Image (spheres, grey):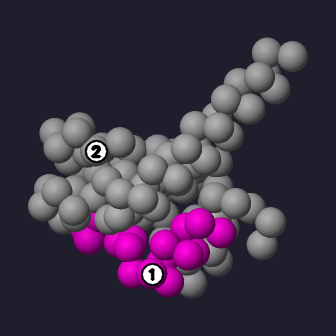
């Protein structure tokens, strides 16, 4: 795997610092265990609503990453479209990679 974000997410999973699936992620948000939430780009808008509402209420950063459910599932060893990071160190690194990737995409569009 040559994708740094997916590699870090896989490492996070192996360390047991990630929660997968809509209901577990929502629960981790409202119990203040989630530091960040990531969603696959093909995660349904309807399913996103509850997570986005909980994230907004609990002030948890939420990102839609430029990866599909299949790509996310392959990296995590379980098919899923949404994940909550429950470790601050992993969360900080993942957010850094996402923001860097978004900057690069914006620069690409500006060129």
Magenta span covers which residues? Answer: 7-25
Kindly indicate the quadrant of the structure image that contains residue 16: bottom left
Q: Is residue 5 visible?
A: yes
Q: Main secondary structure of the magenta part?
A: helix
Q: Compared to 104, does 107 lie above or below?
A: above
86 shown above or below 99? below
Tell me which corner region of the image, top left, top right, bottom left or bottom right, holds residue 110. top right
**Point 22% across, 39% down: residue:** 59
- Left or right of 90? Residue 110 is right
Nearer the observer, 24 or 46 = 24
- What residue lies at 21% left-to-right and 62% top-to-bottom? 33
Image position of 75 (left or right of 56): right
- Residue 14 image offset from top left, x and y in percent: 50, 83
Q: Is residue 16 magenta?
A: yes
Q: Position of residue 82 (x, y in %)?
A: 43, 62
Residue 27: name its quadrant.
bottom left
Graded by Cα atoms within 10 Å as few (under 14), some (14 to 19) or many (20 or more), the crowding at tag 1 reads few
- Report whether 110 appears left or right of 65: right
Residue of label 1:
15
Q: CA distance from mark 1 to mark 2?
A: 21 Å
**Residue drawn where x is 78% and y is 72% of the image:** 1
Residue 18 in the magenta stretch? The answer is yes
Q: Nearer the viewer, mark 1 or mark 2?
A: 1
How crowded is the residue under tag 2: few (<14 C-alpha within 10 Å), some, or many (20+)?
Answer: many
Q: Is residue 44 visible?
A: no
Residue 76 lies, in percent from the top left, at: 55, 77
Q: Position of residue 60 (x, y in %)?
A: 28, 44
Label of residue 108 in the image: none
Secondary element at tag 2: loop
Q: Are marks 1 and 2 in contact (CB under 8 Å)?
A: no
- The residue under label 2 is 60
């Amino acid at each position: 795997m040559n994708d740094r974000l997916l590699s870090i997410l896989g490492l996070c999973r192996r360390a047991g610092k990630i929660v997968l699936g809509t209901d577990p992620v929502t629960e981790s948000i409202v119990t203040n265990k989630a530091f960040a939430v990531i969603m696959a780009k093909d995660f349904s808008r309807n399913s996103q609503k509850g997570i986005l509402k909980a994230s907004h209420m609990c002030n948890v950063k939420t990102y839609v990453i430029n990866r599909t459910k299949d790509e996310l599932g392959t990296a995590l060893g379980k098919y899923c479209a949404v994940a909550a990071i429950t470790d601050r160190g992993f969360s900080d690194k993942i957010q850094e990679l996402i923001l860097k990737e978004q900057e690069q995409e914006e620069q690409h569009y500006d060129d």
